[in-house]
Image: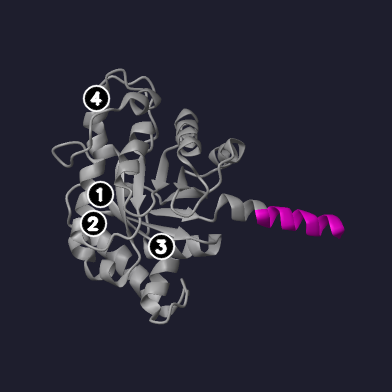
Amino acid sequence: MSRIMGLPPLRQRLMTGAPVSSSWIGGTDPLIHEAFLRADFDAITFDVQHGLLDEVSLKLGIERAALLGKPSLVRLPIEDRALAARTLDWGASGVILPMVESVGDAERLVAATKYPPLGQRSYGPTRTAVLHGYEDRDDYARDARNETFAFAMIETAAALAALDSILAIDGLDGVFVGPSDLSIALSGDGTRSPRGEKAETAVRTVADAAKAAGKVSAIYAATPQDAAHYRELGFRLICTGSDLGTIEAAANALAKAVRG
């Protein structure tokens, strides 16, 4: 393998080291991206599903992360496997696909994001090979089979029912919990309660099942307190807060302090 730089070993840390912390980015401003990249997070996650990012701002954010030495993950729009492959070609270290409810959904994710023989990802790592410091693009393709991540989001009752089968899929690296949507799906009446009893039981089930399967468990935490709680449950990757929420809270705190 010929490399001249390379990103931090995300897989090794996720599988064997301390939990990985990630910022959560929905805005498009490059200066905001850079601020969160310079903060003491291990990774950065771009939320395309609910964020404001378009393809241009997403591509530039992924590039900025690589050039600053941080791995980037992308939460995709629902069923957007084409964008999954593109973000990996742009330099992302992994993707998160929402609303995976079956083995078939997860298999299609693996097919789009893993090079053969694991999947059917088309060969074209022009930008990502350069950003990750590969002199030979074939070396990147070989490493990417193991080093890039494909996460299936578990956020419905159907996904929970198929959890063990989903986790057994070769090439699927882990599962990502969206506590809000999961709580709504399990409530029976559309109530959102991410730390409610039903959601908590389901969250623990996912963490335990992923560990038993030797896969990575990941989750979104709205607050630092939630992040600490999910670390105690054994989650390996924890995305906390959001760029827009953090800025709004800081602006309100500053205004309140100025007024005395």
Based on the picture, tell me whether residue 250 belongs to the magenta stretch: yes
Q: Which residues are magenta?
A: 248-260
- 236 up-or-down from 122: above or below: below
* Mark 2 touches mark 1? (CB < 8 Å): yes
Q: Quadrant of the C terminus?
A: bottom right
Query: How many neighbours does mark 3 have within 10 angstroms: few (below 14), some (14-19), or many (20 or more)?
Result: many
The quadrant where residue 147 appears? top left
Q: In the rendered structure, find residue 105 and report the number of the disc placed on it.
A: 2
Q: Tell me which amino acid carries mark 3.
A: Gly
Q: Main secondary structure of the magenta part?
A: helix
**Tag count in the figure?**
4
Between discs 3 and 4, the one toward the N terminus: 4
* Mark 2 touches mark 3? (CB < 8 Å): no
Residue 75 lies, in percent from the top left, at: 40, 50
Instruction: Using the numbered discs, state the Cα–Cα distance from disc 2 to disc 1 in whole angstroms.
Output: 6 Å
Comparing labels 3 and 1, the label whose residue is closer to the camera: 1
